[in-house]
């Protein structure tokens, strides 16, 4: 098998490049890939609704706080999402994948957040889950002595919550520059190994004679 004569020359030219060229090449390539990803990926919109647990005359604030934590976990269960799908107009699986809840350890409030490629659908899903959750809580109000009320409706977002092509391009450029820097750090080590692997030069006859005369 014959060796390609162009390959050693190409390797020598690659090794002769200045270190900063690898950094620049990595940053440019990463920026282009990141920007392209931001353009191709569809935007994502996020909408959030809030409900609050209010104690009745037979309960206390501490009890309301505990039930708010419980309602935050119940909101994404099938019993609630099964009713919410009717008002949202989407399957239960879509709600399970795109609706999340969050609670606060200090306030009896539940945040219901929905994401969607459509701004109006994100708000509709968050409001639908809120409506279904408050109705389920109302059916057990006599037992829990806690009333779940809507605190704020989800509104249609005016801008996507996903990263813009500019942001993804900057992230890609940073990652590409970092990879280029790692390559720069590895190159000198490889060169040192090649130098270490070469056989030591044998002294010539004249040098050997001089050394013998010195002795």
Image (spheres, grey):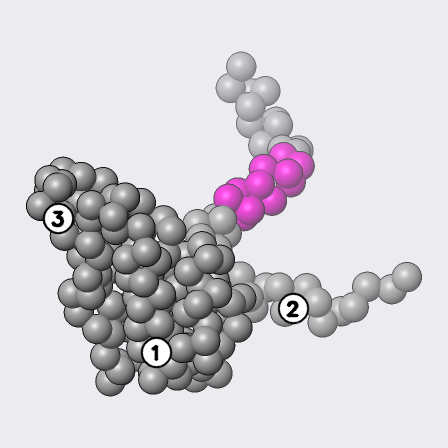
Q: Residue furthest right?
A: 1
Q: Earlier in the sequence, mark 3 or mark 2?
A: 2
Residue 2 screen position, x and y as percent: 87, 64
Prevailing secondary structure of the magenta residues: helix
The kind of secondary structure element at disc 1 is helix
Q: Are marks 3 and 2 in contact (CB under 8 Å)?
A: no
The residue at the point 31 percent across, 68 percent down is: 131
Residue 211 appears left or right of 160: right
Q: Say if residue 133 shows up in the picture.
A: yes
* Front label number (3 vs 2): 3
The residue at the point 70 percent across, 67 percent down is: 7
Residue 5 screen position, x and y as percent: 76, 69
**Which residue is denoted by mark 1 in the rendering?**
124
Tell me how far mark 3 sits from mark 1, CA to CA: 29 Å
* Between 138 and 119, the one nearer to me in the picture: 138
**Which residue is denoted by mark 2 in the rendering?**
9
């Amino acid at each position: 098998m014959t060796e390609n004569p162009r390959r050693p020359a190409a390797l020598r030219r690659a090794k002769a490049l200045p270190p900063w060229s690898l950094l620049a090449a990595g940053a440019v390539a990463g920026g282009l890939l990141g920007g392209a990803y931001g353009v191709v990926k569809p935007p994502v919109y996020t909408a959030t609704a809030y409900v609050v647990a209010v104690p009745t005359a037979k309960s206390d604030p501490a009890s309301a706080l505990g039930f708010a934590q419980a309602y935050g976990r119940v909101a994404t269960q099938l019993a609630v999402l099964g009713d919410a799908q009717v008002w949202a107009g989407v399957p239960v699986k879509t709600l399970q994948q795109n609706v999340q809840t969050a609670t606060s350890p200090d306030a009896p409030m539940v945040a219901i957040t929905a994401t969607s490629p459509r701004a109006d659908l994100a708000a509709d899903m968050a409001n639908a889950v809120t409506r279904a959750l408050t109705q389920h809580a109302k059916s057990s109000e006599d037992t829990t002595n806690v009333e779940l009320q809507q605190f704020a409706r989800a509104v249609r977002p005016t801008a996507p919550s996903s990263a813009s092509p500019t942001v993804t391009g900057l992230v890609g450029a940073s990652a590409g520059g970092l990879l280029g820097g790692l390559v720069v750090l590895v190159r000198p080590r490889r060169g040192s190994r090649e130098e270490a692997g070469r056989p030591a030069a044998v002294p010539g006859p004249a040098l050997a004679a001089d050394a013998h005369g010195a002795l």
